[in-house]
Amino acid sequence: MTAVGSGFPLATLTPRWPAPRRIVVIKPSALGDVAQSLPLARVLRTLYPHVELAWVINRELAGLLAGHPCGLTPLHFERRAGLRAYLRLLRGLRAERFDWVIDLQGLLRTGVLTGLSGAGLRIGLQTAREGSGWTCNQVVPGTARSSPAFERVRRLADWLGWRGDWPRLELGVTSQEHDWVEHLLKDLPRPLVAIHAGAGWETKRWPAPQFGRAVRQAAGAVIAVGSRAEQPLAQQVLAEVAAVGKPTVNLAGATSLLQLAAVLGRVDLVVSNDSGPLHLAAGLRTPLVGVYTCTSPRQSGPEPEAPAELVATQVACAASYRKRCPHRGDGHLACLNELSLERVARAVEQVLARRAATLPQG
């Protein structure tokens, strides 16, 4: 067994691990992480055209895999469903007799799945925590936490033997979903701006009204997106836009994941905190403005091919990756206040100007 933390090009491993018939990727969450990782499916499909591909994914995100062009079989990970559901998934993994397991999550719960899967080749990243790296017999070099998140998956692809350009994000968006979006947006004036003001951590949520104020002059119409729980944030965004007479559409909690992707692929600009919709838009190559407070645009930013302008706070504790602000008094959530409306509005204007320059005239 190769020592944990080492690795070498897979071409040299072929005698020991022949071309796989069945591969499973373990990346259950979150939306942005899955969106950044999904191009790996095209890499695997190209390198091994006849392989059967499966993906372990949280049930609430499984819709992202529906109709995927690479033919991904979703295996549902139900984190809050208890031990019985976890053991059911583990038994299912073992029954499928996968040749390879690729653990991109690198946590105890995914490491156990990897180690007990029965797969001959168990691949992990150097970011593995909670002892999960010890269940892998190959750990891809150059994938430490110091590398940007998008880059780690690419280094895995390079290690597997990929030599082409990085694939774009592919999704199984159907004609029905495209038609639904066209009908919804057809009478709205351009430019169309989609806003996601939510995020899982309070330290990543720039104030929702600020989003509305940042876009209301430059946008023709504004569409708010997000989960059902983020509807109040969406309403705050749209109230600021409606105050200047611009058309608005509230889709928070009203779309499937593929409908959300269809919307984000249709608009002229996405403005978002560091969250799943930002990375979904980046993968679709939609122009975007990313707002970064407690996370780093270098470490957690979108892939470099995305037409993005990233605006980050400049407080001393920026990019601390704290889910809750540890400061009190005037320092509490100072990162959100320091990141000014003017900076974000200027980024919106710049990206829309570049977008307008690429559109056909007349």
Image (cartoon, rainbow, N blue to C red):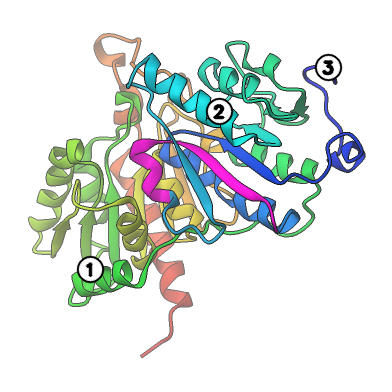
Which residue corresponds to mark 1? Answer: 220
Q: Is residue 168 above or below residue 53?
A: below
Sequence-first disc among 3 and 1? 3
Q: Nearer the viewer, residue 207 or 256?
A: 256
In the image, residue 47 lies in the stretch drawn in magenta = no
- Disc 3 packing (10 Å; few <14; some 14–19; many ≥20): few
Q: How many marks?
A: 3
Is disc 2 placed on a helix, strand or loop?
Answer: loop
18 sits left or right of 175 in the view: right
Q: Residue 44: x and y, percent?
A: 68, 50
Q: Nearer the viewer, residue 158 or 54?
A: 54
Whether the residues at callouts 2 and 1 have beta carbons within 8 Å, the answer is no
Instruction: State whether residue 330 appears in this view.
Output: yes
Q: Residue at x 47, y 43 (%)?
A: 74
Residue range of the region highlighted in magenta in the rendering: 50-64
Residue 105: which numbered mark, if any?
2
The answer to the question of whether label 3 and label 1 lie on touching residues, with beta carbons closer than 8 A, is no
Which residue type does callout 1 highlight? Answer: Gly
> In this rendering, does residue 343 appear at all?
no
Reply yes or no: does residue 52 show up in magenta: yes
Would you identify the image quadrant in which residue 121 lies? top right
